[in-house]
Image (cartoon, grey):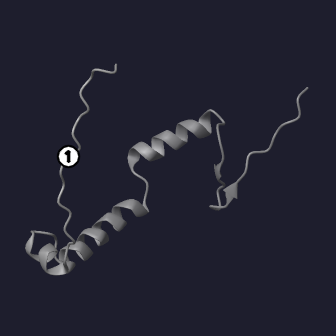
Amino acid sequence: MGNEPVPEKPKVNLTPSSSRQRASSGAESGKETVQWLDKFTERMVLPGEHEEAFFARRRELKLGVGLDENGNLVQAVETPKK
């Protein structure tokens, strides 16, 4: 243990990034970013088929909480033990 060499710390040169550097580095333009965000938002608004199947299965098994038929949050209610 005592004879093991101590690893050297990596040398890193940190330089602040400027907007000019980001613009010229191939980063997305503002328009591309907005388009990507719009497409992403559209896809995230509705559940995918895997999400629907996952939660349908949980409802079948009476697991967890969720939404009622009106879209209201339903909290778990502890049933009395018999």
Identity of the residue drawn at 19% across and 79% down: 19
Identity of the residue drawn at 70% across and 53% down: 74
Q: How many marks?
A: 1
Residue 79 falls in which quadrant of the image? top right
Q: Quadrant of the N terminus?
A: top left
> In terms of depth relative to the viewer, which is nearer, 14 or 60?
14
Identity of the residue drawn at 21% across and 63% down: 14
> In terms of depth relative to the viewer, which is nearer, 24 or 53?
24
Left or right of residue 34, residue 13 in this image: left
Q: Quadrant of the C terminus?
A: top right
Residue 56 falls in which quadrant of the image? top right
- The crowding category of the residue bearing disc 1, from other C-alpha atoms within 10 Å (few below 14, some 14 to 19, many at least 20), is few
Q: Which residue is mark 1?
A: 10
Image: 81 above or below 35: above
Image: 79 above or below 45: above
Q: Which residue appears farthest toward the right when viewing the image?
A: 82
> In terms of depth relative to the viewer, which is nearer, 39 or 72?
39
Identity of the residue drawn at 17% across and 60% down: 13
- Residue 42: x percent and y percent? 35, 66
> In terms of depth relative to the viewer, which is nearer, 7 or 24?
7
- Residue 20: x percent and y percent? 13, 80
Left or right of residue 81, residue 32 in this image: left
Residue type of the residue flagged with mark 1 = Pro
- Residue 80: x percent and y percent? 89, 34
Q: What kind of element bears circle 1? A: loop
Image: 75 above or below 35: above
